[in-house]
Image: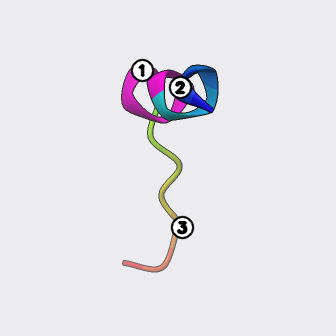
Amino acid sequence: MLKIEKNIYEEPIVPETQ
């Protein structure tokens, strides 16, 4: 599951609730 972690690091998914 390293590929998934690397994907998160490359483009983090943040909810638009600011």
Image quarter of residue 12? top left
Q: Answer left or right for 18 relative to 12.
A: left
Question: Decide: marks 3, 1 in contact (CB < 8 A)?
Answer: no
- Residue at point 36%, 78% (across, down): 18
Mark 1 lies on residue: 10
Residue 2 is situated, as x and y percent measured from the top left of the image, at: 53, 25
- Residue position for label 3: 15
Image: 11 above or below 16: above
Q: Which quarter of the image is occupied by the N terminus?
A: top right
First in sequence: mark 2 or mark 1?
2
| Residue drawn at 52 percent across, 67 percent down | 16
Name the element at disc 1. helix
Number of residues whose C-alpha sits closer than 10 Å to that of mark 2, classed few (under 14), some (14–19) or many (20 or more): few
Q: Give the range drawn in magenta.
A: 6-10
- Is 3 contained in the magenta span? no
Q: Residues within 10 Å of mark 1 (few under 14, many from 20)?
A: few
| Residue that mark 2 sits on | 2
